[in-house]
Image (cartoon, rainbow, N blue to C red):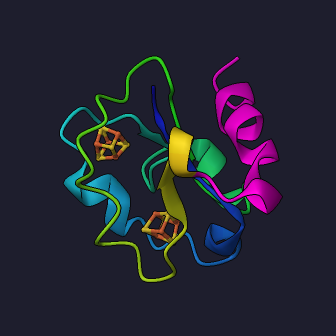
Amino acid sequence: MTFVITETCIDVKDTACVDVCPVDCIHPTKEEAQFEEVTMLYIDPDECIDCDACVPVCPVDAIYSEDELPEDQSKYTQLNADFFE
Ligand code: SF4
Ligand code: SF4
């Protein structure tokens, strides 16, 4: 399983989630060149350990467990994974 970042992160991308992720699987970080180009951040599904630490720190409730993703946000599972292709 993985956690997924959804629509409400767009144009917020405050990186609060990056700061708490124990396995550094949320990208791009502010230190990465792509940070300025993206509209939101993404979780690497191959690295996420489903620890839930990122969920409560997100100011816009953008992060969900994959199996609790609202139906209208379902495309974000693939959109998060695609970033790491
Ligand atoms: S904490 Fe929420 S709004 Fe901030 S970057 Fe992470 S997912 Fe986006
Ligand atoms: S659930 Fe844990 S491992 Fe997965 S992105 Fe959030 S903080 Fe990182």
Q: Position of residue 25 (x, y in %)?
A: 38, 34
Task: Point out the stretch of residues depicted in magenta.
Answer: 69-85
Quarter that holds the N terminus: top left
State the residue at coordinates (66%, 74%): 8
Q: Position of residue 10 (x, y in %)?
A: 70, 70
Overall secondary structure of the magenta section: helix
State the residue at coordinates (81%, 61%): 72
- Vertically, is 16 above or below 21? below
Q: Position of residue 83 (x, y in %)?
A: 69, 32
Residue toward you, 65 or 11:
65
State the residue at coordinates (49%, 55%): 64
Residue 40 position by quadrant: bottom right
Q: Is residue 24 left or right of residue 29?
A: left
State the residue at coordinates (53%, 40%): 67
- Report if residue 47 lies within the magenta region: no
Q: Is residue 36 left or right of residue 42?
A: right
Q: Position of residue 38 (x, y in %)?
A: 72, 55
Quarter that holds the C terminus: top right
Residue toward you, 80 or 67:
67
